[in-house]
């Protein structure tokens, strides 16, 4: 199988490191290839939303599997704008689109699943939903949409932020988030590739929890005092950071397990932080 990745970021790069041996050829895009030295074995192409090189277009056209990890913007989906015409013709290919559980919006901490209608409160939510629909239409329905929870893993976790002194415990009563370890994202991508047909799947852990609990658990593992609690109402935060606290929901992963056969390696943040700490993270 020939794999092309639109947006070789943290999750997609981790997928290649874990499952790259399953493909005969792997290529993908980054904004600036000169700034990436961790992409050995991948044919890298520059793409920042402008007109792609002819060779890039040909590889996208000929790919058997397309993994899309570029988010949409105010002008729409840059990947579809650049490659939509070539994807609308030729052979059928599997498209796996990495989306976000943020499309569900605020449910006051109640449980939601793939049958729950999204709530497009913010522009970025409307952009995400429009991109999901556009990719579904372009791929003639043979697209698996993976709605990802908050992503963490090696180099990107509460142990690292605590050690760096940037961790905060923002307290908003009733607030809960889901998370997902990058290893489990990689497993979900591979399972989606093997899945017959398309569909939407939530890729998240078993235990949505308040964000301050994750920081406190990481501090306990490290044997350090957690940062002080900060009331959400008075905490200094960027508008973007504050907007993430506007939504509170418990997102179900039952369909992911039932239909894609996924067994999470890290079903809770505690499982993951325990493993990351043993591996030397945060030291």
Image: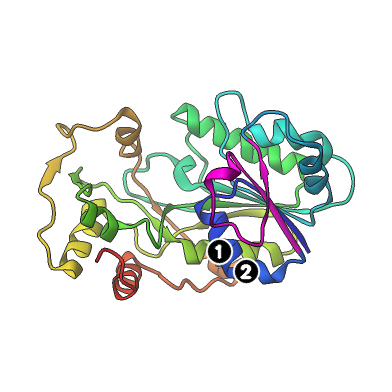
- Element under label 1? helix
Q: Is residue 108 above or below residue 21?
A: above
**In x, y percent, where is residue 113?**
49, 53
Tell me if label 1 and label 2 are in contact, CB under 8 Å. Answer: yes
Which residue sits at x=24%, y=33%? 237
Mark 1 crowdedness (10 Å alpha carbons): few <14, some 14-19, many ≥20: many
**In the image, residue 45 lies at what x, y percent?**
68, 44
Residue 260 on image: x %, y %: 61, 67
Nearer the observer: mark 1 or 2; the answer is: 2
Q: Is residue 255 visible?
A: no
Looking at the rendering, in which quadrant would you find the N terminus?
Answer: bottom right
- Horizontally, residue 72 falls left or right of residue 175, namely right
Instruction: Give, as a single range, the part of the protein colored magenta.
Output: 25-47
- Dot 1 or dot 2, earlier in sequence: 2
Residue 131 within the segment the image draws in magenta: no
Of 191 and 113, nearer the camera is 191
Tell me: residue 135, above or below residue 147. above
Q: Residue at x 32, y 43 (%)?
A: 108
What's the CA distance linking mark 1 and mark 2? 8 Å
State yes or no: residue 42 in magenta: yes
Residue 74 lies left or right of residue 142; in this view the side is: left
User: Residue at position x 12%, y 63% from top?
Assistant: 224
**Residue at figure coordinates x 48%, y 27% from the top left:** 123
Considering depth in this image, is 143 or 250 the residue closer to the camera? Answer: 143
**Is residue 116 in view?**
yes
SS category of the residue bearing label 2: helix
Tag 1 residue: 186
The residue where tag 2 is placed is 19
- Tell me where residue 266 appears, x and y as whole percent: 41, 70
In the image, taking residue 220 as reference, residue 205 lies left or right, namely right
**101 displayed left or right of 142:** left
Q: Which mark is residue 207?
A: none
């Amino acid at each position: 199988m020939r794999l092309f990745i639109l947006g070789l970021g943290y999750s997609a790069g981790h997928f290649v490191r874990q499952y790259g041996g399953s493909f005969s050829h792997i290529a993908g895009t980054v904004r600036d290839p000169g700034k990436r030295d961790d992409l050995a074995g991948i044919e890298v192409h520059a793409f920042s939303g402008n007109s792609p090189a002819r060779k890039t277009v040909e590889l996208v056209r000929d790919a058997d599997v397309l993994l899309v990890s570029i988010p949409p913007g105010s002008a729409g989906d840059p990947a579809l704008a650049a490659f939509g015409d070539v994807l609308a013709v030729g052979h059928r290919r599997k498209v796996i689109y990495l989306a976000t559980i943020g499309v569900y919006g605020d449910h006051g901490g109640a449980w939601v699943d793939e049958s729950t209608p999204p709530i497009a409160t913010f522009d970025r939510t409307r952009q995400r939903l429009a991109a999901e629909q556009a990719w579904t239409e372009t791929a003639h329905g043979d697209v698996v949409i993976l709605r990802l929870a908050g992503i963490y893993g090696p180099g990107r976790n509460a142990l690292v932020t605590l050690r760096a002194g940037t961790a905060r415990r923002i307290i908003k009563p009733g607030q809960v988030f889901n998370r997902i370890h990058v290893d489990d994202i990689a497993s979900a991508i591979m399972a989606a590739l093997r899945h017959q047909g398309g569909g939407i799947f939530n890729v998240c852990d078993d235990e949505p929890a308040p964000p301050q609990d994750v920081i406190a658990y990481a501090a306990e593992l490290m044997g350090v005092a957690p940062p002080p609690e900060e009331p959400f109402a008075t905490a200094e935060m960027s508008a973007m950071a504050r907007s993430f606290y506007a939504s509170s929901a418990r997102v179900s992963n039952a369909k992911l397990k039932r239909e894609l056969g996924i067994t999470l390696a890290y079903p809770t943040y505690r499982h993951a932080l325990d493993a990351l700490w043993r591996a030397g993270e945060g030291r």
